[in-house]
Image: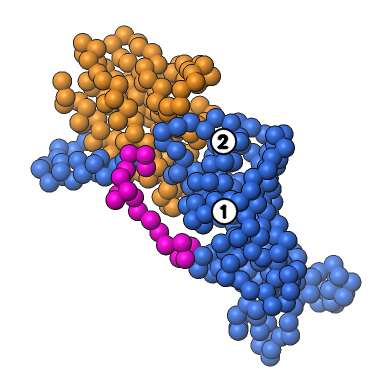
Amino acid sequence: MKLHCIAILNRQDSPVYLRNFDTPSDDVKYHSLAYTSCDVIEERMASSKSNDLFLGLLQTVEELSVYGYVLNTGVRIILVLSVPESMVRSSSVREMFQQIHAAYIAMVCNPFNEELDGLSNAKFESIISELSRIHSETK
Amino acid sequence: MAMSNAPAVTATASLLSALSLDGNKGPADSRQANGSALELLVSELVRTLTLATQDIKRNSEQLAPGLCSEENVEVAKVSGVLPRRSSGTNDSEGNSPAAVSGWQEVPEDNELMEQVYVKLELVGFRVGRRLAERFAPPNRRLVDTLDIVKFVCKDIWMILFNRQVDNLKTNHRGIYVLQDNKFKWFLRMSGNNGGAAAARRAQPYIWLPCGVIRGILNSFGVNAVVIAETLGLPQCTFQIKVISDD
């Protein structure tokens, strides 16, 4: 399982953070993937009665799987993974989301972050890098 | 990302292991802060903001006379257009004793207290937004405004004051009234001037929680106006008027 992209969008669907682990020229592709995933998220949230923040698999594009997670405050986290042989447990994806959620909370609570949108922070970046490192090694 | 040597790898690995959401943490992992520390901090915050605002106001009054002639300023002061210097007699250096000996009494100056209100409420708002992110339940979804207000009454009140709101009333059309009969920050206040005067002096202390509630609601997409009043220490009531949802 390889992690390709992490995107965080705020309640109004505007991007707050996007980290692309492939080539920089793929940025555009991941931006548009994040936006299309937003529509799927809206649908899922409107229809689903579940009490869960994890929304599961949103869409698959070529060999990429897109998973979504929506916080109570409306912030959307989107993960783009490539899964060889479709072997991924939703519990491990859920765990990744929870780690990102915890890192996001830590970043927001930092009093030196002036705005709660437009985030970027060295510690958050290192956590995200670590996540991608872990998940590009496992087969 | 730079090539990592062995110590760096273990350092970043421990970064991840230190991360966990509240729902997954055991009781031994959760960290708590002393509630008294918060009370002491808030009382100093109110006092400091009031003194600082008083200073700013006095300095801007000193600058304004430079812009117009002295007699105009005197006329303006006498006719009530410009506020007079703050209450209390001035000593020889022109400093009001309130600034030197400490703040004794809530200033009579309504304009000053309005400015203090704006600042305290804004501080509360920023704190509320962060509280919402930090303490929103990670394992369930808050669906409607009533859920969110209940979250404030139970979880947030428990976090800030170690108790829950006593009474929640709503008209189901966007007005919520939260009643706390033993508001924690009022418990240590004694008003020997009688109920009404003590209640007025205690006003600034509920401006901060107003901002906190507004900030939390704003995080969940609910725009509201929050007003607080106290009819007698230690009781206080917060009224939430929802302007728009999501």
The total of numbered circles placed on residues is 2
Report the chain shown in blue.
B
Q: Kindly identify the residue that appears in the image at 30 percent across and 45 percent down.
A: B26
In the rendered image, the vertical position of residue A139 relative to residue A128, given as above or below? above
Mark 1 residue crowding within 10 angstroms, few (<14) / some (14–19) / many (20+): many
Type of amino acid under label 2: Asp
Question: Would you say residue B129 is visible in this rendering?
Answer: no
Residue beneath disc 2? B147
Residue A105 location, x and y as percent? 40, 42
Badge 2 element: helix
Neighbour class for label 2 at 10 Å: few (<14), some, many (≥20)?
Answer: few
Q: In this rendering, would B59 be left or right of A135?
A: right
- The tag earlier along the polypeptide, 1 or 2, is 1
Q: Nearer the viewer, residue A13 or B238?
A: B238
Whether residue B25 appears in magenta in the rendering, the answer is yes
**Residue occupying image coordinates x 28% and y 11%:** A63
Specify the segment rendered in magenta: B22-38
* Circles 1 and 2 on the same chain: yes
Position of B196 with respect to A139 (left or right) is right
* Secondary structure found at label 1: helix
Q: How is the image coloured?
A: by chain
Q: In this figure, which residue is indicated by the disc labeled 1?
A: B124
Q: Which chain is orange?
A: A
Chain of the residue under label 2: B
